Image (spheres, grey):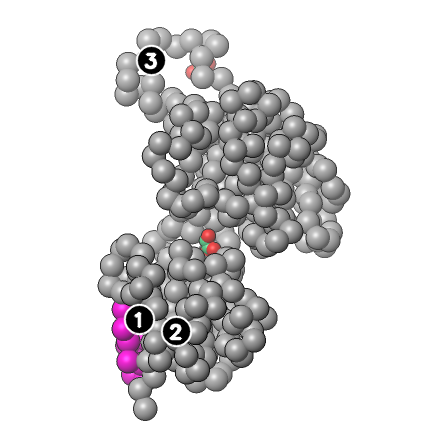
Amino acid sequence: QMLKVFVTRRIPQEGMKILQKAGMCNLSVWDSDEPVPRAELLKGVAGAHGLLCLLSDKIDAEVLYAAGPNLKVISTLSVGFDHLAINEIKKRGIRVGYTPDVLTDATAELTVALLLATCRRLPEGVEEVKNGGWSTWKPLWLCGYGLSGSTVGVIGLGRIGLAIARQLKPFGVKRLLYTGRQPKPQAQEMDGEYGKKRQEISDFVVVSCSLTPDTQGLCDKTFFCKMKKTSIFINTSRGAVVNQEDLFGALSSGQIAAAGLDVTTPEPLPTDHPLLTLKNCVVLPHIGSATYSTRGVMSELTANNLLAGLTSSEMPSELKL
Ligand code: GLV
Ligand code: GLV
């Protein structure tokens, strides 16, 4: 019996090949680079045994109801799972696959790139070269803050947070501070100091926690007010960890020096959004894991998780519900 699988987007071919080769799936794909419209998602999942989705698909009770009782597995092409209604999924005994580990280094690297781009004002510099603003070498022009000798505070020292700390170390970071639910033994090798309210003494605050009810809106006015005027805020986790109005206030009033964001609310951020009018705010379009090889491996892992769920076998990366 062929098992019905709905894939909500065109994904890297590595994963599709695995699904096709398995020969057990009746594959239905929303074959586009654009998100599946809600109505098509609800239609596409009807009767499905497996669902392969992305972080931009909201998988809630309505989708699960539309899928019906066949649905055994949801495999998301992401490490984040805040787009999945976990309690509803658990209630129905559906298994979930996701993609930790394989994107850790790529996402940490993008975080370092964004941090450097923001603190050394690369987008502004590129713009000045193009618009004729580069008149001569100027001692006081386009100065920023460097990493050497700095103190970095990481919010959420998980897999990606640790990789960020490791990758930043060779730049001469002096102190690594971190917050989170509990101290991490792995932080010791980097002399990481655990404690609350570390944003007060950090030159760079890097958000790398997952989005949960506890972290939603964590970075708000109160939070930014405790940061130094010379400090820089970086977020590569989820936009909703930040209160964006408060961030805009902190950036436009000079409460903090600059911000670099790879994630926003909403995504995409509208082109007329106030944050995009600020020179001291660098916004990227959620590209943390976007290397060819990482996306290829994510695609493979997502396919293998799905197949394991369909055949009731052990998943390479199952989310413990
Ligand atoms: C990216 O944000 C992911 O969750 O994989
Ligand atoms: C910079 O290019 C310098 O020579 O100091």
Vertical placement of residue 152 versus 254, above or below:
below
Is the shortest distance between ligand 1 and the CB of mark 2 under 8 Å?
Answer: no
Task: Report the Cα–Cα distance between label 2 and label 1.
Answer: 7 Å
Find residue 154 and report its image quarter: top right
Please tell me whether residue 317 belongs to the stretch shown in magenta. Answer: no
- Identity of the residue drawn at 52% across and 72% down: 89
Residue 304 x %, y %: 41, 73
Around disc 3, counting alpha carbons within 10 Å, would you say few (fewer than 14), some (14 to 19), or many (20 or more)? some
Q: Earlier in the sequence, mark 3 or mark 1?
A: 1
Element at label 2: helix
Left or right for 143, reference 137: right
Q: Residue furthest left?
A: 31
Q: Earlier in the sequence, mark 2 or mark 3?
A: 2
Label 3 near label 2: C-beta < 8 Å?
no
Please tell me whether residue 21 belongs to the stretch shown in magenta. Answer: yes
**Which three-letter amino acid code belongs to the residue tagged 1?**
Lys
Label 1 near label 2: C-beta < 8 Å?
yes
Query: Which mark identifies residue 66?
Result: 2
Residue 179 x %, y %: 69, 45
- Identity of the residue drawn at 34% across and 61% down: 38
Span highlighted in magenta in the image: 19-29
**Which residue is more in the foreground, 81 or 92?**
92
- Identity of the residue drawn at 47% across and 9% down: 139
Q: Is residue 150 visible?
A: no
Q: Is residue 61 visible?
A: yes
**Which residue is more in the foreground, 122 or 56?**
56
Is the shortest distance between ligand 2 and the CB of mark 3 under 8 Å?
Answer: no
Element at label 3: loop
Vertical placement of residue 273 versus 66, above or below:
above
Query: Which mark identifies residue 134?
Result: 3
The residue wearing badge 1 is 43
